[in-house]
Structures are given as structure tokens and as C-alpha cells.
Image: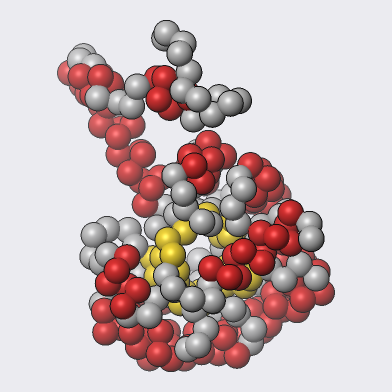
Amino acid sequence: MTRAGEQVRAFRELHARGCFVIPNPWDVGGAKVLAQLGFPALATTSSGFAWSVGRSDNHVTLEEALGHFRSVASAVPVPVNGDFEGGFAVEPECVAANVAAAVATGVAGLSIEDSTGDPSRPLFDLPLAVERIRAARGAIDASGTGALLTGRSEGFIVGRPELDETIRRLAAYAEAGADCLYAPGIRARDEIAAVVAAVAPKPVNVLVGSGFATVGELAQLGVRRISVGGALARAAWSGFLEAAREIRERGTFSLLGAAIPFDEIDGRFSADGRESLSER
């Protein structure tokens, strides 16, 4: 079996039972460190990657996203799921073509969301949204990769926090071939439990960007996968901005002194994995 095939197999096994955390690095360095820390799989973050190249979320190109998938997937020994936004297209046949290109990068899975980017009509009409998922499923099947497809319904983060409609959409995406279902923004325990029950036995991903739940609590609700989206990137930017503002506004450098020591972080990227002894 090829390396990519092994990653897909491992990724699917993670979704078969239990509950796991799939954190979201925004660059290769972060991906390597998260793998070193023992996370069994990783997922890219569209927002974190966009910020890293000086853009706002959903403003990178298809080619940039594909290159990012390729870089991250080839850098780590664990499966990587690609945040493929809305498939970088509207029409199902174009989504299918883009998904075919995405699974060729080596990712073990990817997600397709149903948001339009238009505040006046934030979600695709359900029939079109279903056809987009079905097209993605067909492209994956034709590729022979077995990559795992996650169907996302974005209502709770685009101003349409309607549980019944979200469940209706997720159930339709499951029927259309999504292997995993995901409604970012749902936080209430009863709503999470309702989503899990509605699409069972297919696994559900829950987004956690604050301390509203623990891994154990979500596992008890039947959640199979937990991601953090752009939250790790936001945490890193918080430290960066706080330290930069101290320098600019106060002319002091105390927060830099609290940073991780040079040798400790540099050692994580050394060829032999040992901490660097360099003096900087």
C-alpha cells in the first residue's frame, strides 16, 4: 500500500470508534510540532493559512490551497484533512474537478461547505448543496484514493443558527455520500447530541474554539472528531500582537522573555530531533 493509501486507511479507522482531536496547523512547522506532540491526525485551517499569507479568510486561490495541502501532507507522518472551503467553485461539475485535484495532493480527507459568501443568501439552496456533495463524492470515488469526505453546513456561523435546518442539511449530505458531518458553531450540548443522533452511525465533527466543553464531555455526547479551526492560529497571533504592542507602545521587551527558549523550539526542527545547543 502506498503512503497516501496508508494515511487514508488510518484516517478512516480513527473515525470508526471513540473520539479524537484533530488540531488545525496553519503551516508546515506547526504541523510537524503537533505531530510530534502525538496527535493522530491534523487538519488545515482556511483562516489560519489565509492570515499567514496576509489575506482574510476565503481569499486564497485554488492553486495556493492545493500547494498548501501538498506541503502539509508531505511533511508529517499522520493523516491530514484539507479544509477545502466550498470547493473553490459553485457548479457541481467544477467542484468535482477541484476535489479531484485536491485528493491528488496526498490529503487523507477534505471538507466541502455550503456557505455562499453572500450575506443576503448565506447558504446554497439545499438541492444545489446536495449536488455539490454528491459531485465531490463522485470525484473521490473516481480517484480511487478512498479519501474521507466531510460535509459541512455553515448556518450557525453565517447568521442562520437553525438546528432543524442544519440537521436537514447534514442528513441530506450524509445520504449524498459524506462520510463525516460537521456544523461549525454549534455549542449547546442538546444541539450537539441532536446532530449526532440525526446522522448516526456516521461520525460528527464538533468545532471547539473556547472552553465550552472538554474532550470527555463531547465523547459522552457521541462526538467522534473535534477540531479547533483557526483557534490555534488566533492564539499564536494573540501572543505575537501582545508582544509587538508592548515594544511599540511601551518600549519594553518583557513578553519576549517569557517566550519558549530558542533551543527548545529550534530542537524540534533539527535533523536528528534533539534540542539544538546553539547559542543565540
Q: Which residue is farthest top?
A: 279
In depth, the one of 165 and 209 nearer the eye is 209
Q: Is residue 146 left or right of residue 32?
A: right
Q: Residue at x 43, y 88 (%)?
A: 167
Residue 153 percent coordinates (x, y): 48, 77
Quarter of the figure that contains the C terminus: top left
Q: Is residue 97 left or right of residue 153?
A: right
- Quarter of the figure with residue 82: bottom right
Q: In the rendered view, would you say 126 is above or below 185?
A: below
Residue 32 percent coordinates (x, y): 53, 40
Q: In the rendered view, would you say 18 is above or below 211?
A: below
Quarter of the figure that contains the N terminus: bottom right
Residue 87 percent coordinates (x, y): 64, 66
Q: In the rendered view, would you say 189 is above or below 201?
A: above
In depth, the one of 200 and 122 nearer the eye is 200
Q: Is residue 148 left or right of residue 205?
A: right
Q: Is residue 28 left or right of residue 218?
A: right
Q: Residue at x 64, y 79 (%)?
A: 133
